[in-house]
Amino acid sequence: MSRSAEWYFDFISPFAYLQFKHFHRLPADLEVRLVPVLFAGLLGHWEHKGPAEIPAKRVQTYRYCHWLAGRLGVPFRVPPAHPFNPLVALRLAIALEAREEAVATLFDFIWSEGGDIAAPGALDTLATRLDVGNAAELVAAPAVKQALRDNTAAAIARGVYGVPTFAVDEELFWGFDATDMLLDYLADPALMADPEMQRLARLPSAATRRA
């Protein structure tokens, strides 16, 4: 019997790119639905900063991703500027039904080649690679824009707070570094029924920061 999962992602995330490059590790019977979301929308809802909004963390993140990609043998080049506005890429992916081959083309342009999604001619280049004749019309379509808002709202309602996130059953697995935990859960869903896992899910807070 096949199983299903949702994968919430934004092209702005290098970790989403790295995890996407490791989809080959997923079980063959796992049906994955790719769901483009706006990371900035998640940040706004949960009221927290992204890695690139903390200066020291920004530098560490870029250097770590460069190092990690090299260690993993994944082609990697950070775009000319980051953060960048990912809306065009997200909307184009949605217009193309978030098909894996289309998402792969977009990810490779941004993170394998270090392409500037906002550069003049970038959309035309992608349209050619994706064999799409009306890319500008597609990304401007009201229905496509609304679909991205709906995707983001649905992700928030499910508890998604960052990208990339796999949602399987009632469980969320956030980040590329959670890939092995996801694989263990898929192999044995009883992982989350472990008494210590259950205790951790109910763990109280002993202190909170002032707002």
Image: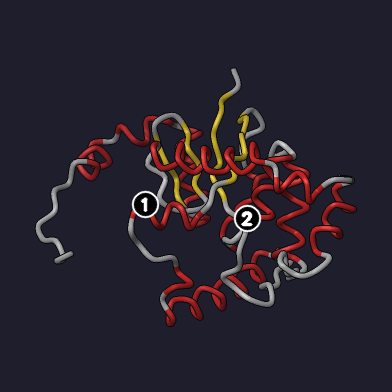
The residue at which mark 1 appears reads as 45
Q: Upstream in the sequence, badge 1 or badge 2? A: 1
Residue 112 image offset from top left, x and y in percent? 74, 65
Q: Nearer the viewer, residue 153 or 134?
A: 134
The residue at which mark 2 appears reads as 87
Q: Residues within 10 Å of mark 1 (few under 14, many from 20)?
A: few
Q: Against 179, is 115 above or below? A: below
Q: How many marks?
A: 2
Residue 2 badge:
none
Residue 108 image offset from top left, x and y in percent? 75, 59
Q: Identify residue type, mark 2.
A: Leu
Image point (57%, 43%), residue name: 148
Left or right, residue 128 beside residue 13: right
Left or right, residue 69 beside residue 158: right
Q: Against 27, is 79 above or below? A: below
**On the rendered image, what quadrant is the N terminus found in?**
top right
**On the rendered image, what quadrant is the C terminus found in?**
bottom left
Image point (65%, 45%), residue name: 23
Image point (70%, 47%), residue name: 140
Residue 107 image offset from top left, x and y in percent? 71, 56
Left or right, residue 201 beside residue 172: left
Residue 15 image offset from top left, x and y in percent? 56, 60
Find residue 82 and report its image quarter. Answer: bottom right
What colouring style does the render use?
Answer: secondary structure
Q: Nearer the viewer, residue 209 or 152?
A: 152
Q: Identify residue type, mark 1.
A: His
